[in-house]
Amino acid sequence: MALCQLAYVSDIDRPCSPGDISNLVQAARRNNVRDNITGILLAGRGGFIQLVEGPRMAVIGLLDRLEADPRHHNMVVLHRGDAHLRAYPDCPMTFQYADSDSLNRLEMSVPALSSGLCSKLTAEAVGLI
């Protein structure tokens, strides 16, 4: 099985209440279990940053759904590539409110995010959060 990782940042179309976030995370966990996808979602007042990983076709299908989701605007893919191991193997969707520490942990868990353009985009994404 070819393992693929995808990381993106996007604007949120409207403020999300804790209930909205809870519903989103519960639905993502159900879908991710079905599709053998794991990852982490970081959310804040203005945006999402997410890393997902799993079988290539499942991740591509998820990206297609995310791009069509009206809650996402200005989506920028920070990283898309093959992986030998999962950075988040034990959870179909970890959720955290984004802050500098959680962004640093995300960058440390996926080496491609800490290089060049990806690092710059991730730093700019803090403004969304």
Image (cartoon, helix red, strand yellow):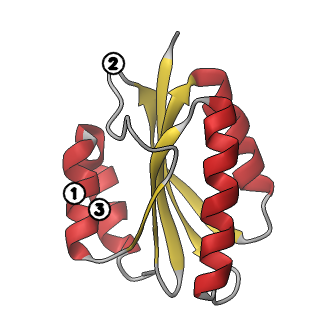
Task: Tell me if 111 is positioned left or right of 21 in this view.
Answer: left
- At a point 50% along the width and 54% down the height, the residue shown is 8
Q: Please tell me whether mark 3 sits on a helix, a strand or a loop.
A: helix
Amino acid type of the residue that numbered disc 3 sits on in the rendered structure: Lys
Asked whether residue 54 is in view, the answer is: yes
Camera sees residue 78: no
* Residue in the foreground of this view, choosing between 124 and 1: 1
Q: Residues within 10 Å of mark 3 (few under 14, many from 20)?
A: few
* Residue 82 relative to residue 48: left or right: left
42 up-or-down from 47: above or below: above
Q: Position of residue 71 (x, y in %)?
A: 73, 71
Q: Which residue is mark 1?
A: 105
Label located before the other in sequence (2 or 3)? 2
Sequence-wise, the earlier of marks 1 and 3 is 1
Residue type beneath disc 2:
His
Report whether 122 appears left or right of 111: right
Name the residue tied to disc 3: 120
Give the percent coordinates (x, y) of residue 97: 40, 76
Q: Is disc 1 surrounded by few (<14), some (14 to 19) or many (20+) residues within 10 Å? A: few
Q: Residue 42 versus residue 60: which sits nearer the camera?
A: 42
The quadrant of the rendering that contains the C terminus is bottom left
Residue occupied by mark 2: 84
Kindly identify the amino acid type of the residue bearing the numbered disc 1.
Arg
Q: CA distance from mark 1 to mark 3?
A: 16 Å
Q: Point out residue 100 in the picture as x, y percentages from the top left corner.
A: 23, 75
Mark 2 touches mark 3? (CB < 8 Å): no
The residues bearing labels 2 and 3 have C-alpha atoms spaced at a distance of: 25 Å
Image coordinates for residue 78, horizontal then vertical, percent? 44, 50
Residue displayed at 25% across by 52% down? 107
